[in-house]
């Protein structure tokens, strides 16, 4: 499934070409952690923590929430677009 998710960058891992986003719905009742593995075309060094971005990618895995972690979705082959806050 190809998805587009808008969220705030929580962390950037340049070596693994991966960003972690935090998504919260408008009501604040639902949170989702998004782990996005980026394509080689993305210039990961231009991405910074706390930036608002849109991530486009293929859903690979969903991990249900636990007491310590929110729901998590892993995406692969991702592109990133910075958005206006």
Image (cartoon, helix red, strand yellow):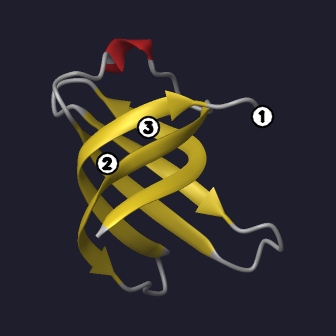
Residue depicted at x 59% and y 59%:
23
Q: Earlier in the sequence, mark 2 or mark 3?
A: 3
Q: Are marks 2 and 1 in contact (CB under 8 Å)?
A: no
User: Is 60 situated above or below 22?
Assistant: below
The residue singled out by tag 2 in the image is 36
The residue singled out by tag 3 in the image is 11
User: Is 46 situated above or below 26?
Assistant: above
Q: CA distance from mark 2 to mark 1?
A: 20 Å
Q: Nearer the viewer, residue 59 or 71?
A: 59
Residue depicted at x 31% and y 48%:
36
Per the rendering, the mark at residue 38 is: none
Q: Secondary structure at mark 2?
A: strand
Residue depicted at x 43% and y 13%:
46
The residue singled out by tag 1 in the image is 85
- Foreground: disc 2 or disc 3: 2
Q: CA distance from mark 2 to mark 3?
A: 11 Å
Name the quadrant containing residue 79.
top left
Image location (x, y in percent) of residue 74: 28, 62
The N terminus, quarter of image: bottom left
């Amino acid at each position: 499934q190809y998805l587009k998710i808008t969220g705030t960058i929580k962390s950037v891992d340049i070596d693994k070409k991966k960003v972690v986003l935090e998504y919260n719905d408008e009501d604040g009742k639902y949170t989702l952690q998004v782990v996005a593995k980026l394509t080689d075309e993305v210039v990961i060094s231009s991405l910074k923590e706390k930036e608002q971005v849109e991530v486009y990618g293929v859903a690979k895995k969903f991990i249900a929430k636990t007491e310590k972690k929110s729901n998590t979705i892993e995406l692969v082959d991702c592109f990133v677009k910075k958005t206006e806050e």
